[in-house]
Image: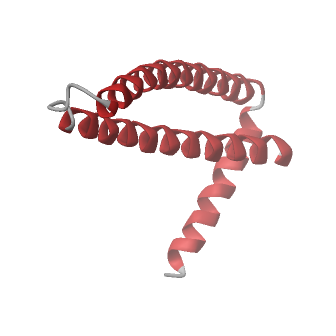
């Protein structure tokens, strides 16, 4: 039981980190697009070549991020379904885990 709950917690933390990383990456892409737009008045020379290459790279990165987000969403649904199945198979264990977590949270809040 403890192994399952710690694995679920590790997966949740990994998903939160992944979501944070995706958010940071999206912000970086938005900043890069703003920089590229700011150089739009340079239509000739090396800046133009760099801008077109950067636009291609950003388009590819957006596609990759969309695929990653879709994968994360599917994994989250699978974990939720697994958790639901576990709770239905072991209702009393789930109640005990929830009560234990509630007690721990209450103790931590009470110490503040």
For this rendering, which residue is in front, 38 or 72? 38
Residue at 52% of width from left, 77% of height from top?
110
For this rendering, which residue is in front, 14 or 89? 14
Instruction: Give the total of numbered labels.
Output: 0
Placement of 36 over or under 53, stated as above or below? below
Placement of 81 over or under 29, stated as above or below? above
**Picture coordinates of residue 26, whole percent (x, y):** 39, 36
Residue at 38% of width from left, 31% of height from top?
50
**Picture coordinates of residue 106, whole percent (x, y):** 55, 67
Instruction: Quarter of the image for the N terminus: give it.
Output: top right
Residue at 52% of width from left, 21% of height from top?
64
Q: Quadrant of residue 78?
A: top right
Q: Is residue 52 left or right of residue 102?
A: left
Q: Is residue 32 left or right of residue 63?
A: left
**Please, which colouring scheme is shown?**
secondary structure
For this rendering, which residue is in front, 67 or 94? 67
Q: Is residue 39 left or right of residue 60?
A: left
Q: Quadrant of residue 58?
A: top left
In the current view of this chain or complex, which residue is farthest to the left?
Answer: 41
In the current view of this chain or complex, which residue is farthest to the bottom?
Answer: 111
Residue at 19% of width from left, 32% of height from top?
42
**Picture coordinates of residue 45, whole percent (x, y):** 29, 29
Q: Is residue 82 left or right of residue 68?
A: right
């Amino acid at each position: 039981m403890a192994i399952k709950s710690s694995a679920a917690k590790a997966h949740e933390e990994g998903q939160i980190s992944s979501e944070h990383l995706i958010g940071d990456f999206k912000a970086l892409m938005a900043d890069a697009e703003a920089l590229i737009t700011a150089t739009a008045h340079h239509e000739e020379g090396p800046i133009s070549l760099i801008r077109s290459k950067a636009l291609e790279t950003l388009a590819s990165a957006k596609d990759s991020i969309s695929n990653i987000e879709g994968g994360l969403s599917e994994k989250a649904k699978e974990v939720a379904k697994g958790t639901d199945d576990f709770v239905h198979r072991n209702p009393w264990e789930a109640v005990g885990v929830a009560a234990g977590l509630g007690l721990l949270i209450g103790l931590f809040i009470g110490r503040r």
